[in-house]
Image (spheres, rainbow, N blue to C red):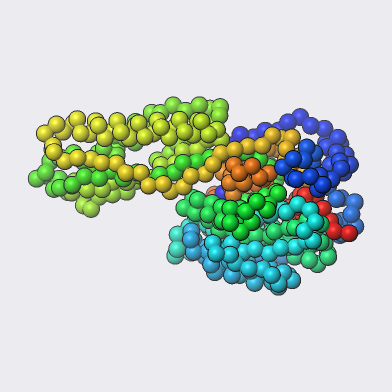
Amino acid sequence: MPIPNRLHIPARDLARRLLLATTIASPFAVPAALSAQAAPLLLQDPAIKRAMDVMPTLQQWTLAQQVSICEIPAPPFKEQARAEEFKRRMQSFGYADTRIDAEGNVIASLGKGDGPTVMIAGHLDTVFPEGTDVKTTRTGDKIAGPGIGDDCRGVAVVLTLAKVLKEQNITPRGRLLLVGNVGEEGPGNLRGVRHLLTKEFSGQVNYFISVDGAGGGAITSRAVGSHRYTVSFEGPGGHSYGAFGMTNPMHAMGRAIAKIADIKTPTTPRTTFNVGIVRGGTSVNTITPLAQMDVDMRSEDAASLADIDQKIRAAIAAGVAEEIARWPNSRAPVTVKYDTIGIRPTGGQSDDAPIVKTAWAAVEAIGWVPATLASSTDANLPIAMGIPAITINGGGRSTGAHGTQESYTELPDSFKGPQLALLIVTALTGLAK
């Protein structure tokens, strides 16, 4: 899910940007990564005009898709039920070739294939474990439910885009891949897009767009990388009274956490860390043989991420050494093991990158205020691979992401989320004539 980092709003003239977006020559004749210009928005095309006009009338339909898909559980690694329903809906729109790949991603395609290949995706998975009550509740324009914004909104935008493209007989000149992907959230470690970009469509995707969550004109163009570990502190354990004086894995972990908390990080590039989960112990009167903590660290700069990783490992080693030194007569060792939860790569693109300029012009064209930022999304992987990629918002407003009280508020202009997706993908693929 998108976690905003730094917001960047260059001073740009609206009229100049809109003119640029509608007059620049198409980049389709050269590889997407080599294009130096934005793709032109197709605002004057009759089919695009019709599609733009119909999307406000579908606002409640889009919301209904969002709510109904959200009430199908999709815990990490168990997204199948939601994937099957996404596939069924895509087929009902006329995408007969819709399929589910070996990793669980749902894929449909549209277009002649005479131009760039563009992939647009909303992620099907949530952070919530199996058994979570995913029933939504509505109060006025506000809907509450786990995952209602992140990323049921993005999935609903992809469904709306797919429906309108078929109904308005819009055929991309290139190839458009419409995807409901799995494995975006933490435990998934981007497994869905990793499979798509390294196996299913390796070397074939020219542009990647993720629709992740609600919101307006912010464009995620830079990737906040992350390292996440489960760190295990292990020892023989014993009775809290009878074995007192033995080194204690839980105490070693506590010392390590205290040292981690004192680490200083740069504000530019923004670099963060967190001990998010601690676990262990069998009873109050047992020196536990196992204590564990889950650690998260993030930065949009690879060197800073590597540096904080090294400092945290040093803090953990120092905490263990202090625990051993505290009990010099103990022969019980404390060992440390690292298990990787997830590694997300860093990377970025200039505001002058063609995909960013195209998205910027599209945001302005629908009347939202554009900005670029860094975040952690499915776009991390393609950005790190050198594939032009962004993450956009789906309209509306959401709060409380990753909490069971997550909510989404429908706004009068929520329909602009699907409009934005339409303008960007058709600009990048072009239209068949």
Q: Is residue 154 left or right of residue 296?
A: right
In the image, 148: left or right of 160?
left
Where, by quadrant of the figure, is residue 361 drawn? top right
Residue closest to the eye, 259 or 399: 259
Image height check: is 72 above or below 206? below
Residue 28 seen in the figure: yes
Q: Residue at x 40, y 30 (%)?
A: 311
**Looking at the image, is 312 positioned above or below residue 206?**
above
Check the picture and name the quadrant holding the C terminus.
bottom right
Residue at (55% x, 33% y) in the render: 301
155 vs 235, nearest the viewer: 235
Q: Residue furthest left?
A: 242
Image position, residue 405 (x, y; %): 52, 54
| Foreground pick, 400 / 223 | 223
Q: Position of residue 236 (x, y in %)?
A: 18, 47
Q: Is residue 299 left or right of residue 175?
A: left
Q: Is residue 4 visible?
A: no
Question: Where is residue 313 shown, x and y percent of the image?
Answer: 36, 34
Residue at 23% x, 53% y: name it: 282
Q: Position of residue 250 (x, y in %)?
A: 26, 42
Q: 98 or 408, which is in the foreground? A: 98
Quadrant of residue 174 within the rendered picture: bottom right
In the depicted structure, whether residue 206 falls above or below residue 156: above
